[in-house]
Image: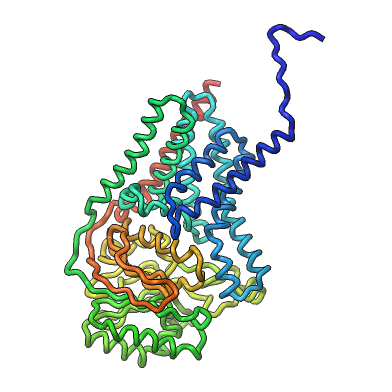
């Protein structure tokens, strides 16, 4: 049989070869996701924050929506499988769930979170294909489409089902040049710039023209230099005189937290550690340092502590549960005793740790859902600010400081921030270090110093630039001392919150939609 002269035979690609190629791509996506947590604390290998997304973007460029969805999902499995593996510690070691059940619950949690990146991959590839025909399709996709979708899904993850903003990629940049943008755009702005940086590096590798490579590299370096320059700006001003602060880290075993027999040991430990630091203007104890209800110790232990604080001209801010005996509800709270008595009830509670969703169904099914003190109620969103050291304080309890948009509700009135946390839930894992990284970014976003006291580390004093001034040793009884300077004024992020980034997302979405519709009209 003859073939026409203008016809070229194309040898079909074997299905086995296609399958092998896809398997390699999926494996690369999984490994890229698993490497990304290493860009965060405690390792903080920042280049991976650019390289891991760049590899995923590359895999998406030639993928079908289904293939991109699978690779995105596997990326998410790697990211959360490594990055939030500490959930297993909380469920098994302190939630007393047997190993198989703890593994199952942790796997389900990771599998759910990975869905965000599966959805991200599908939308990224689908819209990328719809931009086909444009001369600068690849540039538009990498610099605009992929970063915008990623940030959008991070933002949705921060509030959907009460929110879980852990491992937002912007947090990895707290010690990079890009961190200078945090007071303007917050963590989601940092995420966007990080992903644009990843796209620039990928374009640099894919572009064979040396002149264009140098241009892309110049933009990448320019972003970091601009951020470094912004970090030199003083967005807020000093308010009053510097204050002496002491953070008390009791380092008591987590399993004794709600044990009545261990209460006196706990109270004695914190009182003795405090006794040596009455010369401080502010003394901070961690979340639930006093592990009994406020009304049980109000007229005894707390009254004596407050009297000692007033005598020495200081305030002690400490965590304990507070019960409203009129309606039998209780709160996870931070109170101030001493010169300026006050009380703050935690607003954003942790699902399953502090309250149980679908309680009537889940209570009694698994021991983890029946932990002591796991039926807290949320406090009012509008509460009077605590006063400590003569200054109004933005107060958060543990996990609350992961939500920047909620922290700024207490600003610009507050001149400093206090966070009391119980990181003992997570043992010797990534969690305490990741949490401190998140807290540092809150200080940088708001231009406020932060006093962060934890049960067994890491307790830290952080200045208004997000820089660690002093920190505790982990898993040791410790007291962190230092001088902090209250600040007044508002950063752009305090004024506008996430609105600028959401507006940028809206503009990016409108532009992409316009280009897609225009492409359809041409065809």
- 107 shown above or below 60: below
Quadrant into which the C terminus falls:
top right
Q: x, y (%) of residue 52?
A: 50, 45
> In which quadrant of the rendered view does residue 347 lie?
bottom left
Residue at image coords 71%, 34%: 17
Looking at the image, which residue sits at the far left? 241
How many marks the image carries: the answer is 0
- 376 shown above or below 223: below
What colouring style does the render use? Answer: rainbow
Residue 345, can we see it?
yes
Looking at the image, which residue sits at the far bottom? 300
Quadrant into which the N terminus falls:
top right
Residue at image coords 52%, 21%: 522
Between 74 and 491, the one lying in front of the other is 74
> In which quadrant of the rendered view does residue 448 lie?
bottom left
> In which quadrant of the rendered view does residue 358 lie?
bottom right
- 372 shown above or below 160: below
Q: Residue 180 vs residue 140: left or right?
A: left
Q: x, y (%) of residue 88?
A: 58, 66
Q: Residue 273 vs residue 329: left or right?
A: left
Residue at image coords 37%, 54%: 174
Q: x, y (%) of residue 58?
A: 53, 37
Between 404 and 99, the one lying in front of the other is 99
Q: Residue 410 vs residue 188: left or right?
A: left
Residue 185, can we see it?
no
Residue at image coords 42%, 83%: 290
Looking at the image, which residue sits at the far top? 5
């Amino acid at each position: 049989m003859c073939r026409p002269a203008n016809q070229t035979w194309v040898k079909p690609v074997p299905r086995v070869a296609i399958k092998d190629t896809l398997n390699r791509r999926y494996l690369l996506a999984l490994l890229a996701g698993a490497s990304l947590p290493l860009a965060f604390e405690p390792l903080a290998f920042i280049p991976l924050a650019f390289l891991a997304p760049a590899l995923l973007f590359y895999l998406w460029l030639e993928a079908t929506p289904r293939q991109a969805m699978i690779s995105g999902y596997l990326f998410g499995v790697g990211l959360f499988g490594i990055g939030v593996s500490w959930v297993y510690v909380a469920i098994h070691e302190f939630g007393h769930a047997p190993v198989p059940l703890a593994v199952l619950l942790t796997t389900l949690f990771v599998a759910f979170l990975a869905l965000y990146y599966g959805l991200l991959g599908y939308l990224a590839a689908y819209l990328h294909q719809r931009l086909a025909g444009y001369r600068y399709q690849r540039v538009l996709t990498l610099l605009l489409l992929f970063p915008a979708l990623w940030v959008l899904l991070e933002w949705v993850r921060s509030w959907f089902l009460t929110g879980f903003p852990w491992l937002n990629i912007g947090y990895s940049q707290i010690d990079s040049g890009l961190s200078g943008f945090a007071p303007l755009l917050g963590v989601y702005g940092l995420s966007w710039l990080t992903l644009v940086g990843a796209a620039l590096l990928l374009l640099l590798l894919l572009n064979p023209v040396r002149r264009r490579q140098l241009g892309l590299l110049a933009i990448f370096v320019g972003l970091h230099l601009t951020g470094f320059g912004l970090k030199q700006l003083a967005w807020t001003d000093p308010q009053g005189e510097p204050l002496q602060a002491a953070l008390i880290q009791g380092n008591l075993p987590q399993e004794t937290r709600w044990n009545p027999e261990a209460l006196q040991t706990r109270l004695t430990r914190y009182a003795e550690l405090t006794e040596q630091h009455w010369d401080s203007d502010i003394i901070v104890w961690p979340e639930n340092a006093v592990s009994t209800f406020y009304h049980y110790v109000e007229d005894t232990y707390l009254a004596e502590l407050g009297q000692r604080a007033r005598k020495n001209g200081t305030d002690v801010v400490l965590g304990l549960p507070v019960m409203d005996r009129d309606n039998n509800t209780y709160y996870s709270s931070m109170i101030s005793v001493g010169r300026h008595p006050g009380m703050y009830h935690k607003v954003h509670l942790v699902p399953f740790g502090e309250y149980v969703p679908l309680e009537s169904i889940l209570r009694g099914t698994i021991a983890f859902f029946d932990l002591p003190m796991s039926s807290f109620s949320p406090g009012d969103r509008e509460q009077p600010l605590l006063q400590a050291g003569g200054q109004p304080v933005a107060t958060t309890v543990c996990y609350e400081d992961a939500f920047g948009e909620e922290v700024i509700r207490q600003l610009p009135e507050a001149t400093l921030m206090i966070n009391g946390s119980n990181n003992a839930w997570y043992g010797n894992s990534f969690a305490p270090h990741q949490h401190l990284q998140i807290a540092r970014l809150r200080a940088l976003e708001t231009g406020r110093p932060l006093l962060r006291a934890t049960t067994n580390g890491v307790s830290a004093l952080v200045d208004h630039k997000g820089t660690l001034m002093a920190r505790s040793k982990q898993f040791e009884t410790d007291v962190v001392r230092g001088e902090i300077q209250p600040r007044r004024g508002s950063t752009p992020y305090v004024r506008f919150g996430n609105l600028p980034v959401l507006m940028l997302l809206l503009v990016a979405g409108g532009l992409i939609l316009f280009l897609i519709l225009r492409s359809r009209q041409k065809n």
